[in-house]
Amino acid sequence: MTSSSDEILRLASADNFRDVAGAGYATHDGGRVRRGVFFRSNELRLNESDHDTLAGLGLRAVLDLRSKPEIERHPDAAVPGATWHNFDVSGIPMEQVAALRDRRSAVELMDRVYRSFVDSEAARVEFGGLLRQLATGGPQLFHCTAGKDRTGWVAALLLHIAGVDDPTIESDYLLTNALTGSSRARVEAEIVTVLGGDHVSVFEPTLVADIEYLRSGYDAVQARYGDRAAYLREGLGLDDDVVTALRDLLREDEPA
């Protein structure tokens, strides 16, 4: 499935799977983000073909950002050769989703989720642990349930560390909406079955990536730490060696 260096690897049964580097995003100083090092995904409910594809990537580790109940509902398919790690970060609180009655409340809920990535000590500990694990070397894969919020936040941090500009990071973040038609349709069908069709439009803000959410997280970073470098250092507890290791892994040896 990777017959040329320009081909973008996709998985049918994990539709938000992709290389963090995209096609090799440009950095602000003329370099490129290295492909084949870090991969991101939604939950690994894999068909046989996709399982074989993942096994062929030579992954060292799979890093699961889901909570214990999420994992129990849909355990990851084991990937040969990859050690599984859990970094439990609370995602969208389902009990609050069930109580939503209008779209504005759904957006406000999502804003709170992203601010919690910064303000919650428990979340910071888990994100810091995940990034330290990534710094040990690739190839590694990280994911949550939909692969858009917790996973999207980590991917945005990695691209920032690599030196990618914010417009590119935001475009990459929004790719979730273009890629996840099949998994989103499955969730919407479940909503219709359980709650009725009228609830789909109310819940829709919780099913998509929106720049407002990402910027809510950035606003929380600025308010609490001043900038993302301080958030990485003081909030997530990453020392210079870890950040440098991540940057070296993420960047091509020579500018493209």
Image (spheres, rainbow, N blue to C red):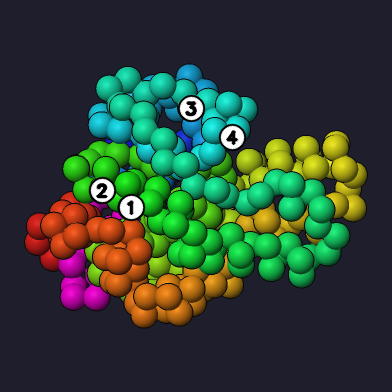
Considering the numbered disc 2 on the image, is that residue within a helix, a strand or a loop? helix
Q: Is residue 9 visible?
A: no
Work out whether residue 120 or residue 187 is closer to the camera in this orientation and state it: 120
Q: Which residues are magenta?
A: 21-35
Q: Amino acid at mark 1?
A: Gly
| Magenta stretch, main secondary structure class | loop
Category of crowding for the residue at label 4, using alpha-carbon neighbours closer than 10 angstroms: few (below 14), some (14–19), many (at least 20): some
**In the image, which is nearer the foreground, mark 4 or mark 3?**
4
Work out whether residue 44 or residue 66 is closer to the camera in this orientation and state it: 66
Q: Amino acid at mark 3?
A: Asp
**Number of the label disc, if any, that sits on residue 128:** 1
Q: Residue furthest left?
A: 254
Q: Quadrant of the N terminus?
A: top left
**In the image, which is nearer the foreground, mark 3 or mark 2?**
2
Q: Amino acid at mark 4?
A: Glu
Identify the residue at image location x=61%, y=65%: 112
Work out whether residue 156 or residue 238 is closer to the camera in this orientation and state it: 238
Considering the numbered disc 1 on the image, is that residue within a helix, a strand or a loop? helix
Instruction: Reply above or below: 43 against 29.
Output: above
In 3D space, how far apart are the residues under numbered discs 1 and 4 (Cα atoms)? 21 Å
Identify the residue at image location x=30%, y=66%: 234
Q: Is residue 30 visible?
A: yes
Considering the numbered disc 3 on the image, is that residue within a helix, a strand or a loop? loop
